[in-house]
Image (cartoon, rainbow, N blue to C red):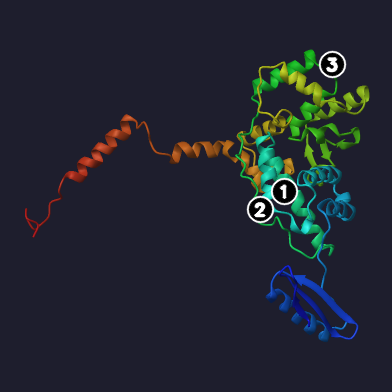
Amino acid sequence: MAIEQLPDGRWKVDVEPIKGKRFRKTFKTKGEAQRFEATCRSKVIENREWSPSTADTRRLMGLIESWYDLHGHSLRDGLRRRHKLDALAKRLRDPIASRIDPQAYAHDRRVRLEAGASPKTLNNELGYLRSVYNELRGLGVIKYENPLALVKPLKIQERELSWLTNLQIAELLDSIRTGCDNPHVEPVVLICLATGARWSEAEKLKATSVRNGVITFSGTKSGKVRSVPISAELEKRLAKHWKQHGPFMHTITSFRRALARTTIRLPKGQAAHALRHTFASHFIQNGGNILTLQKILGHSSLAMTMRYAHLAPDHLQDAIRFGPVLMPTKRSVDSSSTLATSKSKKPRNSLGKSGV
């Protein structure tokens, strides 16, 4: 028979639709076995070369390796991503990739969150793992859908962006000039404050990156080249510095030490990045255009730049102009009283007192 029940209760299919094409498979229910038999008979009649696909039993680490060989190696942070993905696969005990359990993943995420991992880090890892499945499916390496497609990322509480006042900028520069033994720190700080560059972008600059009053940043986070004008004074200062001291190097540690010697206290993770926020915040407060700021900072979407929109002078004035009047002036009180009095007087009409 094509279908028979085994002693353990499962159902075995042994079907040979045409001579030389024989298929065997075991199922938990009789219905599944019958559907498999019918599929085999119909498909082989339509296409003699057809055969049922076998279960994909490749492990998650094997899938990550395939992703890196075919796609990940071309990414700027591909090797870093692979290390994170390998660590995740080990924590999940390297399951069969097609059967990865969303609950097991969610449990691992909870354990790491309680251990101190930030929600943003965990969301990045979820994105990396989803990318493995999506890229390999697009390349035809796997045929099944992403088993974590319905797992939602963690909600992240937006933090207030920290930026420096003019007095704090002066204090920081004074700390660098008087107590820093690394001559490269001050020019990198000045570049960040003058252009809104990320610390890594400023540190990678060379003498050839500054020409005709314009700094050109390459190797940026978005992968795009952008140019930002600078003052003639800063251009001369950078040219003199590179001629005397050579390219920038080993600056971030010295900068953090100089910052620690000041009274400035910034949230964790915003030390050097506060310089970028400082440029953007002052730019908007001084009346700069939000679209121009997007181009200067190199944001791929305007939504990122809109974080600074609340600092615009017009935006702040609107809160005063259009908000409720909490402390009315004497003039507004008198006007309101006059209006109320005028409304209380009944107008005369030609019909007499009764008005009918």
Question: Marks 3 and 1: in contact by CB < 8 Å?
Answer: no
Q: Nearer the viewer, residue 134 or 217?
A: 134
Give the Cα separation between the discs numbered 1 and 3: 42 Å
Q: Mark 2 and mark 3: span between their CA atoms? A: 49 Å
Q: Residue furthest top?
A: 178
Q: Which residue is mark 1?
A: 126
Any part of residue 292 in sight: no
Between marks 1 and 3 in the image, the one whose residue lies nearer the viewer: 1
Position of residue 248 in the picture relative to residue 38 (left or right): right
User: Sequence order check: which comes first, mark 1 or mark 3?
Assistant: 1
Question: On the rendered structure, is 334 left or right of 29?
Answer: left
> What residue lies at 61% left-to-right and 44% top-to-bottom?
155
Residue assigned mark 3: 181
Q: Residue 132, located in which quarter of the rendered image?
A: bottom right
310 vs 339, left or right, is right
Mark 3 residue crowding within 10 angstroms, few (<14) / some (14–19) / many (20+)? few
